[in-house]
Amino acid sequence: MVAAEVLPTNRLLVLAAKRYLRMLEMCGSPQNEFYYSPIHVVDYCRFGEKLKHFEGGNWSIRQFDEYGNPDPSIILEPFEIWIESAIHGFRVRLNDTRLVATALELIPRKNAKSLRATRAALFELCTEPYAPQIPIAAATAKQTEDTLYGDIVAMLNNDRELVDEY
């Protein structure tokens, strides 16, 4: 729909959708240097949806459990699944690593950017055999809370099952 320019959107998103579809087509050739792995996308999304929100937000007035209480479970939106599919789905055929090493996501204010960064960092730390080191640079306790490290700690403190599993 986006690549066909049926949905109203911007030029860059249309180009990204067209590139994504072109890359999927290229994956059909065994001579191509990369392939597409839906299993890796499902692993990332499944991990992400095991997590719980660690900050308040719109989810608390839109997501409820069977008893009517706010449900802090993370539910990935379709656009997030598409982005993660582009990041985690394309793999280098030679060594099975991600084709995309760096991704820039431009997300508007108040759209859970900290949560998205925390989810990505935790996935790397918990599931990748050679997990990257997360740089921690803060002078005060307050500054530590305002970093990715502080968000990871907040998410872990909020989710005992995650700590037990990993």
Image (tube, rainbow, N blue to C red):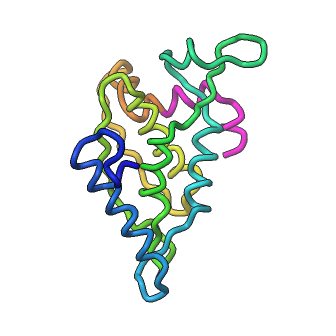
Residue 121 appears left or right of 135:
right
* Residue at the image point whose x is 44% and y is 29% from the top: 150
Q: Nearer the viewer, residue 44 or 20?
A: 20
Q: Residue furthest bottom?
A: 31
Q: Residue at x 61, y 54 (%)?
A: 42
Measuring from the top left, give residue 85's x and y in whole percent.
48, 55
Estimate the x, y position of residue 103 in percent, counting from the top left.
33, 52
Q: Nearer the viewer, residue 30 or 134?
A: 30
Q: Position of residue 95 (x, y in %)?
A: 49, 78
**Residue extending furthest toward the front:** 6
Does residue 40 appear left or right of residue 27 in this picture? right
Q: Is residue 81 above or below residue 116?
A: below
Q: Give above or below for 48 relative to 22.
A: above
- Magenta region includes residue 165: yes
Measuring from the top left, give residue 152's x and y in whole percent.
Answer: 49, 34
- Please, which residue is most extreme toward the right here? 67
Magenta region, residue range: 152-166
Predominant SS of the magenta segment: helix
Q: How many marks?
A: 0
Which residue occupies 71% across, 34% down?
Answer: 161
Q: Is residue 72 above or below residue 8?
A: above
Residue 42 is covered by the magenta coloring: no
The front one of 94 and 3 is 3
Choose between 44 and 65: the one closer to the eye. 65
- The residue lying at 42 percent from left, 51 percent from top is 133
**To which quarter of the image does residue 135 belong?**
top left
